[in-house]
Image: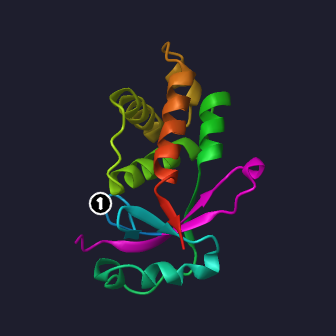
């Protein structure tokens, strides 16, 4: 276990048109670790109300419980819809929707042992590498890359993770 690991509550938000409440995950992460959510069997556990996040700690193992008490607020909100819309339609991402989404959802895919198709894996890593150092989405696509390929990879990643979420 990484001595710098901490517990974090992450909100997964959805577009208003989906008519779906946000989900809350409890993760542990440190300086050298990927985010690791509370899981049961091969599914990520979530709750649909912030006030129920203590249930996630109750369902976790000692690797979570040894890190202390439950955080009192959301560390980060990740919106698949916002990230996909920015990648599809915008030239700039000043709030970091794309990089936050790709990094977190790739961590979740690792947690559920989801194998990404090589084309999508490369697309996501390339886009994440670019967005780590700039907020310009347009600069990435100026080099002849098709937005459709990258948006499809982001949508595929969303579905691959979402199907593995178990709501308590």
Q: Residue placed farthest to the top in the image?
A: 144
The residue shown at (27%, 59%) is 32
Please tell me how many numbered marks the rendered image carries. Answer: 1
- Is residue 14 found left or right of 53 in the rendered image? right
The residue shown at (47%, 42%) is 157
Q: Quadrant of the N terminus?
A: bottom left
Quarter of the image where one finds residue 84? top right
Q: Secondary structure at mark 1?
A: loop
Q: Quadrant of the C terminus?
A: bottom right
Pick the front one: 74 or 120: 120
Instruction: Note whether 72 is above or below 144 in the view shown.
Output: below
Q: Is residue 4 magenta?
A: yes
Q: Is residue 50 magenta?
A: no
Q: Which residues are magenta?
A: 1-25
Label 1 neighbour load within 10 Å: few <14, some 14-19, many 20+: few
User: Does residue 91 appear anywhere in the picture?
Assistant: no
User: Does residue 75 appear anywhere in the picture?
Assistant: yes
Quarter of the image where one finds residue 36? bottom left
Q: Position of residue 162 (x, y in %)?
A: 52, 52
Q: Position of residue 152 (x, y in %)?
A: 53, 30
Judging by the rendered image, the residue that carries numbered circle 1 is: 33
The residue shown at (41%, 62%) is 43
Q: Position of residue 100 (x, y in %)?
A: 51, 49
């Amino acid at each position: 276990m990484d001595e710098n690991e901490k517990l974090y509550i992450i909100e997964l938000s959805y577009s208003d048109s989906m008519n779906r409440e946000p989900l809350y995950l409890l993760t542990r992460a440190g300086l050298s670790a990927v985010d690791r959510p509370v899981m049961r069997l091969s599914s990520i556990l979530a709750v649909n109300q912030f006030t129920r996040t203590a249930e996630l700690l109750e369902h976790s193992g000692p690797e979570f419980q040894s890190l202390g008490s439950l955080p009192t607020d959301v560390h980060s909100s990740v919106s698949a819809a916002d990230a996909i819309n920015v990648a599809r339609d915008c030239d700039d991402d000043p709030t970091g929707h794309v990089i936050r989404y790709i990094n977190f959802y790739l961590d979740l895919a690792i947690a559920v042992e989801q194998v990404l198709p090589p084309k999508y894996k490369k697309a996501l890593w390339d886009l994440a590498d670019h967005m780590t150092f700039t907020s310009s989405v347009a600069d990435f696509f100026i080099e002849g890359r098709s937005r459709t390929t990258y948006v499809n990879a982001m949508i595929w990643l969303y579905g691959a993770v979402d199907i593995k979420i178990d709501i308590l």
